[in-house]
Amino acid sequence: MAKTKEFKAEVQQLLKLMIHSLYSNRDIFLRELVANAADAIDKARFESLTTPALAREWQIRLAVDKEAKTLVVSDNGIGMTEEEVIDNIGTIAKSGTKAFLKMLEENKDNKEPLPELIGQFGVGFYSAFMVASSVEIVTKKAGTELPAVKWSSNGEGNYKLEVGERDDQGTTITLHLKDDAAQYLDSWKIGEIVRRYSDFIAYPIILPEKKVNEDKTETVEDKVLNSQKAIWLRKPSEITDEEYKSFYSHLSHLGGDYLKTIHITAEGTSEFQALLFLPKEAPFNLLMPEIQKKGLQLYVRRVFITDECKELIPDYLRFVSGVVDSSDLPLNVSREILQENVQLRRIEKAVVSRVLSELKKMQENERDAYAGFFREFGRTLKEGIHTDYANAEKLKDLVMYESMNTESGKMITLAEYVTAMPESQKDIYFITGEKRESVAASPALEYFKSQGYDVLFMTDPIDDWIMQQMFQYRQKNFKSVVKGDFEVDGAEELLKEAKEKFAKLLEFLKTTLGDSVSEVRFSARLTDSPCCLIVEGNALSPHLERLFKAMHQEIPQSKRILELNPKHPLVEALFKAYTADENAPELKSYAKVLFDQSLLTEGSPLPDPAAFAKELTQLLLRSLGGGKSDDSSAK
Ligand code: ADP
């Protein structure tokens, strides 16, 4: 008996878009359906290793019918039960659906490349509705006695389920093509799309072809459209760019462009071959870990074992896509075995070491390409410093930062930083913050500038976290310029004198600022600015504090140390004013303005911006010789 069911709201929204808005690059619908068919065969083939009755002569069959205006994609893979059809096609909104819709929303004006991304979000099947006014699926689950299920829909709101007819396991998808999609009835066009996107699919993709014989009779012959070559087993010199590209887009579901290919042929303790790709640009989903494909494809002697094999590559290299084909593993490995397999560990180790050494090479020989890569993936790569202890030193060699001495947009390596250090410089100095402009304005840099020491600008949100683990590079300690005590050789005398001379002023500032600061002291850190704020050695950096607050996290409120520059004329002037009349009302506003502007240069928000503006107005009026303004005009 037929049942009608409604699509989940988000799926409806997605289908509406597919039907009404996406017109460019529609060819990719076939790539997605063929990929699904190949996945289904992969699964059945894997099952057949333990249940031989499921084995077939694996194939994906296509068929066009010009009269009926249909295109059929059919496989003899794993098939689906009724429940699976309901779950997979339409009812359950997958995490990817939401993410895809969000991405479409954000990229409204830029329609062109979007269909390319459909596969990335795990919503490939729906792309059929870009070209079809209605779609039927007839599917029969392999290894069961269940009747076949027929699913049909025109993509508008709901779908129908009924008993279908199918003799053998697998899935047949029939597309009733829209009038404007008639080109997909053309065998030549279909062949071209298959060769472009799906050439290396390991199963024959067959399209029956009519042949006119010499005696004028017609016969139909099967034509295999794809070469099915396992590209990773071929010699790199014999693989064309086009072949690489189409394989890459198959693996990553990204259109076309990669940065580098890495071929590995390992012999000895573990024998395997691998073809890996470094991407050019971060995919939309790199920052959405829940829908991102992670891991490499695992084959054993050309037999597909699993997708997204996380055991083959660590998380911090999740931008790498590719295939590993092992000669050592048994064909019938199970997920559980994979998880603690020694061979896989060895392969992973070899893969990581090779990827890192390729990156190093690129950094040395193709600096611009590497810088571009690092801008996209540096943040991900840095996670490894925290998580991959064994390779932490190699990773430190790969990270790059802008610095006080670089032009905006140019980065240096830690090695370059250390090499450029003057003899007198002991530590590696850094400052963390949102962006170059804000860290570059910090008064805390002044001393370093005066000494000819460079300071690394760490402006990645992840940097603060990484620096909690990165203590040293080449035996040199990392030191934040806005943290902790700071000693300048030969400055003790000056500081001691200032402390004695201005003792009363220090006292006054401390009482006036009260709980906002933990200490007021003199320091030799500053040359041009009158003062700056410093945090205690083990407290969160101001940048990290702001990040946590932005995430509404409860964090201990760390108090700042207000450091004054003993040589600044403002200190002297303030002291004079204080000695002249220690009860003068404007003294308190001077103290507050001083503190608030230090918060501003640190990049932190003011607790009470309106009050700051008011104090400042009063000060301006006073210095311009105006009268005291009343509250309303000062706002
Ligand atoms: P994805 O393939 O990225 O998961 P799709 O929207 O393309 O997303 O497909 C949804 C699901 O439907 C698949 O994960 C699979 O479980 C099922 N499916 C699609 N096509 C087939 C097929 N030919 N055979 C068996 N299952 C299929």
Image (cartoon, rainbow, N blue to C red):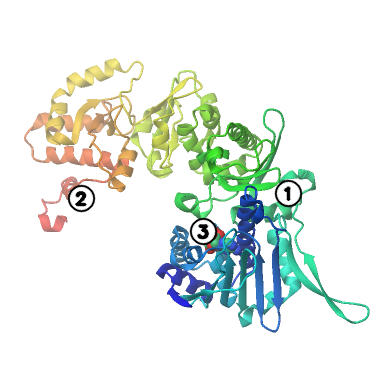
Q: CA distance from mark 2 to mark 3?
A: 49 Å
Residue for badge 2? 613
Q: CA distance from mark 1 to mark 2?
A: 67 Å
| Image: 3 above or below 90 | below
Q: Which quadrant of the figure contains the C terminus? A: bottom left
Instruction: Return the disc, 1 or 2, that comes first in the chain's sequence.
Output: 1
Q: Quadrant of ligand 1?
A: bottom right
Residue mark closest to the camera, 2 vs 3: 3
Q: In this view of the protein, which residue sits in the foreground, 332 or 52?
A: 52
Q: CA distance from mark 3 to mark 1?
A: 25 Å
- Apparent side of residue 144 relative to residue 487 in the rendered image (left or right): right
Is residue 148 in sight in this rendering? Answer: yes
Instruction: Return the disc, 3 or 1, that comes first in the chain's sequence.
Output: 3
- Apparent side of residue 332 relative to residue 95 in the rendered image (left or right): right
Residue for badge 1? 231
| Image: 510 above or below 315 | above
> Callout 3 environment at 10 Å: few (<14), some (14 to 19), or many (20+)?
many
Residue positioned 43% across, 63% down in the render: 93
**Label 3 CB, ligand 1: below 8 Å?**
yes
The answer to whether the residues at label 3 and label 1 have Cβ atoms under 8 Å apart is no
Instruction: Return the disc, 2 or 3, that comes first in the chain's sequence.
Output: 3
**Label 1 CB, ligand 1: below 8 Å?**
no
Determine whether the residue tagged by mark 1 lies in a helix, strand or loop: helix
